[in-house]
Image (cartoon, grey):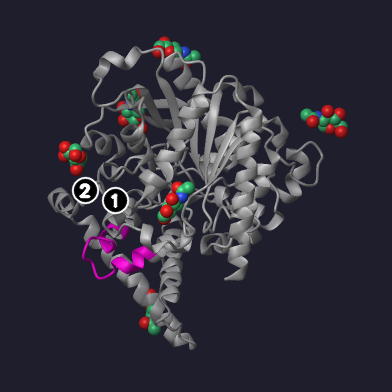
Amino acid sequence: MRQSLAIGLTILSTFLVANATQNFVFPSDQAGQEKLWNDTIQAILKFKEEFESRSPADVLQAEDGDASLTVPEVILRYGYPVEVHNITTEDGYIIQAHRIPYGLACGAVNEGSPKKRVVWMQHGLMGDSSNWVITGNKSRGLGIGLRKISSTKERITDNLGNYRGNTYSTMHTTLLPSQPEFWDFSWHDLGMYDIPAGIDYVLNHTQAESLYYIGHSMGTTGFFVTMSERPEYNAKVKLMSALAPALFMSHSTSVITRLLVELFVPIIDQVPYVEAFPIEWTKDLAAELCKRGAPTQPLCSIILYLIGGKNEPQLDLDSLPAILGHSPAGSSTKTFMHYGQGIVSGQFEKFNYRGANPDKYNGSLTPPKYDLGKITTPIAIYYGDNDFLADPQDVLRGAREFSTLVNLHRVNDTLFSHLDFVWALDQGTLINKPVMDFMEEFANRLPPNGVAGRVQFMNGLLSMTVILVINKML
Ligand SMILES: *[C@@H]1O[C@H](CO)[C@@H](O)[C@H](O)[C@H]1NC(C)=O
Ligand SMILES: *[C@@H]1O[C@H](CO)[C@@H](O)[C@H](O)[C@H]1NC(C)=O
Ligand SMILES: *[C@@H]1O[C@H](CO)[C@@H](O)[C@H](O)[C@H]1NC(C)=O
Ligand SMILES: *[C@@H]1O[C@H](CO)[C@@H](O)[C@H](O)[C@H]1NC(C)=O
Ligand SMILES: *[C@@H]1O[C@H](CO)[C@@H](O)[C@H](O)[C@H]1NC(C)=O
Ligand SMILES: *[C@@H]1O[C@H](CO)[C@@H](O)[C@H](O)[C@H]1NC(C)=O
């Protein structure tokens, strides 16, 4: 069942890719279609067989930089120290955090420094902690990149979270990933349990009072759930830097979101929850197809475009094996369904159990909305004009909900898309520097200055309006 789901999804993406290249014609007759399905399945099975028969030495040879290393190995490869922490959530999941305790120059001496800035970074859907470190030598990977531009770089300690169900977080105190119950979670649960567990663990470990949170996409969705459902956590975060925040989704136009709506929403209450894109070798298939010089490499860029929007100048083809060697990193289908629900309803609301809603939600027929008014953490938003998932119109609508918005930053690139926030060629200047500079500036503000915050918000509104008008004109 799991395998056929993966193969189904792989075939589907193959067709999407083929369609996007526009020199592919879907056969109209049944025999032609059947042959196409057969050929595709044969090709995938053949690859799987070859992959499984490779010796470890072959695998090493095929490795391209960061592609087949684990995240701790990648961090070590760039010369940074790393710690691995297993954190148990209140509902029994064991999530793994990767920690870069201190920078290169200062050494362990600085480890106990009271002025150290503690940062928690949380990845997006189907991502993992690799989002913040791979291709780190190119000043990308915020986890490593931050250190290269900050005057306080040696005092930062990065903590890279991994949501339940991804490559690094497949353990539970009583459940196994082979049980459907393990996959019965959506981003609601990530916000209710994974993020609070991570914050508490790190604050206890570092003896800091509060931390800086940086989230990308679902890393922000989970955060907004935490802070509205468990408001006592607001005081534990000094500043939330929200990259491509995924809150309201009704303007989302990416192929992936269309798939969500077409595939998942109709069956939302009928299927058992399972792992999405489960099998290891799909990642290796991607890494293989996307290798430097491989004739299939252009197809790989299309996969990324389909997900988050197209920004050709910012796509580093050489980094594709590293990117696709780590992602997709796994999540549950229920998480996709919950996003699909929001795209249709236009609300930031709890999971729709349909007939079972009254039982789950104290008699209510419809799922309750999250109370964003409970969020009191200062929030800095970074958004891209060309983001197919976190559309600027939706981001602006979300920004209006926050009474503690302190920065609304449009990335200085009209083509900037969803995945550029973690993998863009110029991530160092377009993301890392503004995020770091604002964190510094904000840390030095005493007390947090509401007026300055509002002025920045107005600037953001203005630039967004201009962009929307320009887009309409083109
Ligand atoms: C496709 O494969 C099935 C069995 O897997 C076979 O019965 C069928 O004849 C094949 N169709 C074509 C058109 O090759
Ligand atoms: C964390 O969990 C992994 C299994 O997922 C285990 O191999 C490792 O030893 C654990 N590490 C620590 C520090 O507990
Ligand atoms: C990263 O850059 C540093 C300094 O330029 C260099 O010493 C190191 O070898 C590089 N590491 C990798 C893995 O490319
Ligand atoms: C806090 O950290 C200390 C040592 O770092 C550990 O012994 C203790 O169990 C932790 N407390 C909690 C509540 O995690
Ligand atoms: C559930 O609904 C009842 C009646 O409307 C109300 O009195 C009660 O406070 C509600 N409970 C919760 C937990 O919201
Ligand atoms: C935006 O980028 C352009 C070049 O792409 C540069 O000329 C301009 O100064 C940048 N604006 C800001 C505010 O950084």
Quarter residue 75 falls in = top left
Q: Position of residue 398 (x, y in %)?
A: 66, 45
Q: Mark 2: is the Cβ under 8 angstroms from ligand 3? A: yes
> Along the polypeptide, which appears first: circle 1 or circle 2?
2
Residue 266 vertical placement versus 441 (above, below): below
Q: Position of residue 92 (x, y in %)?
A: 51, 28
- Check disc 1 and give the amino acid type: Ala
Mark 1 neighbour class, 10 Å CA radius: few under 14, some 14 to 19, many 20 or more: many
Ligand 5, image quadrant it occupies: top right
Residue named by callout 1: 322
Label 2 element class: loop
* Residue sitting nearer the eye, 375 or 192: 375
* Residue sitting nearer the eye, 456 or 81: 456
Quadrant of the rendering where the C terminus is positioned = bottom right
The residue furthest bottom is 29
* Residue sitting nearer the eye, 113 or 263: 113
Q: In this picture, which residue range is highlighted in magenta?
A: 286-301
Residue named by callout 2: 65
Q: Position of residue 345 (x, y in %)?
A: 71, 54
Q: Is residue 239 magenta?
A: no
The residue at 30%/70% (across/down) is 43
Marks 1 and 2, how far apart at CA:
7 Å
The residue at 24%/58% (across/down) is 51
The residue at 61%/57% (across/down) is 466
